[in-house]
Image (cartoon, grey):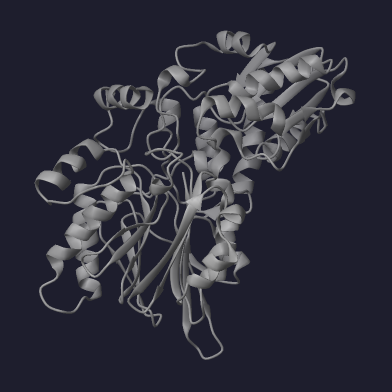
Amino acid sequence: MCGIVGIVSTQPVNQQIYDSLLLLQHRGQDSTGIATADGPIFHVAKARGQVREAFRTRDMRSLLGNTGLGHVRYTTKGAAGREEEAQPFYVNAPYGLLLVHNGNLTNTRELSNELFSIDRRHVNSTSDTEMLLNVLATALQEQITGFELDADHVFHAVEQLHDRVEGSYAVIAMIAGHGLLAFRDPYGIRPLILGTRVTASGTHEWIVASESLVLENGNYDIVRDVEPGEAIFITPDGAMTARQCARTPRLVPCSFEYVYLARPDSVMNGVSVYEARLRMGNRLASTVERLVPTGEIDVVMPIPDSSRPAAMQVAQKLGIEYREGFYKNRYVGRTFIMPGQEQRTRSVRQKLNAMRSEFHGKNILIVDDSIVRGTTSQQIVDMARAAGANKVTFTSAAPPVRYPHVYGINMPSRTELIAHGRSLPEIATVLGADHMIYQEVDDLRTAITAGTSMTDLDLSCFTGEYVTKNVGEEYLAWLEKTQLS
């Protein structure tokens, strides 16, 4: 999971991209990068850390041009601590290409061999984004027959890329002197949204970004989601063309976007994230009501912030008082997306504090958006006990995460997942809770897709059913071995 944005404007884009990345900071905190195009010249600034600490005035002054892209990184492939792994990545041929990517490729072993032995291309990092860039560069080079590059060349190159690459990818790239390219994998697993605004002179300015809130904040009108497999090409003067570049596209977006990753004020694939989380709460309340006598629950509490909508609906539907018992330190990042287990563990107590007055002598029902490794959840139960809670029922607005997520979230090893190979009573014992209740898979599916034309979701980390054809037991075993070595 990362956050990406690309802008074609009539004015300098450096500040626009900076502001957009601030709005996407929740999608990645490891590193960030901005690149702009001033005619055929690229200007790049990237660094480790968050947006506010990464860029200085001198960096912004150097980012010249009216076309640009930006990235905030949450590490899933490649080393978290190396600035060389920060995006965007660059190759100088053809023309000069810069690229940012949100997602994970699942055929990196094959691509690594092909890029070296067939394409004669050198990849200088462990990032799958650099592989993706070189696949695009190779495909684009094969399309060029003369001196000019047109939209047809670009779209044919994306078609070739779809044929070679497996996994999830929302991509924004710049081609020096020619414009901005954006495309999405054939399943639309990771989000990408197109927007526009019209200047006083009647010229269209364009934006593509991971979440709709970026468009709304910049006073862009939302045009639509980039379709699965579709490519968008925008020239520096604002001429936009689009084409479907996949053979059999099918929308199967990642359910975790709605559970946790996206901001609640975003709309993805026509679904309001906030409304989806409210519906998750309604569905979860029905399960709680079936499994636990409501007379044994005094208050409902969320783990701030992403579980609040679900917790409010649980309390309302059960007719139980809603209380805020955990205070969040907003200067600590999202613990789930921190790069290491030790850092996540250390940050939980820095991030949350339990207010004793809300816990003492009460039977507490805690609502969290999801439980992955259980690190945070276990410490939250300990905090509730230490604050004087009588009984603790722990609930998750998402189903048990029993399988690795291979499409852009850092949960590659089944041994790290608290729900893998354990029953619900066993999970409750590990967490130290009196009861453990999860959302049902069908209820999550219904909560997200209700009232939309969307018929499918990527639920692989809950069900073990992967949408891309190359993910099986052999791949998962290899992934676990490489990540843990």
Question: Based on the displayed image, in which of its 4 quarters is residue 374 positioned?
Answer: top right
Q: Is any part of residue 472 visible from this angle?
A: yes
Horizontally, residue 284 falls left or right of residue 96, namely: right
Q: Nearer the viewer, residue 231 or 327?
A: 327
Q: Name the quadrant containing residue 370.
A: top right
- Residue at the image position 39 percent from the left and 46 percent from the top: 85
Question: Residue 473, how many percent across, how many down?
Answer: 28, 22
Using the rendered image of the protein, determine whether residue 4 is visible from the camera's viewpoint. Answer: no
Residue at 26% x, 48% y is: 131
What residue occupies the far front of the structure in this picture? 58
Q: Nearer the viewer, residue 47 or 33?
A: 47
Compared with 196, 333 (above or below) is above
**Residue 330, position as x, y percentages in the image:** 72, 42
Q: From the viewer's side, name the closer residue of 3 and 13.
A: 13
In the rendered image, the vertical position of residue 367 relative to residue 139, given as above or below = above
Measured as percent of width and height from the top left, residue 29 is found at 55, 45
Residue at the (64%, 47%) spot, across then down? 274
* Residue 79 horizontal/vertical position (percent): 40, 38
In the rendered image, the residue lying farthest to the bottom is 201
Position of 323 relative to 155 (above/below): above
Residue under the image location 21 percent in, 65 percent down: 93
Q: Is residue 428 left or right of residue 168?
A: right
* Total numbered badges shown on the rendered structure: 0
Most foreground residue, 321 or 75? 75
Q: Is residue 202 left or right of residue 298?
A: left
Quadrant (top left, top right, bottom left, bottom right) of the C terminus? top left
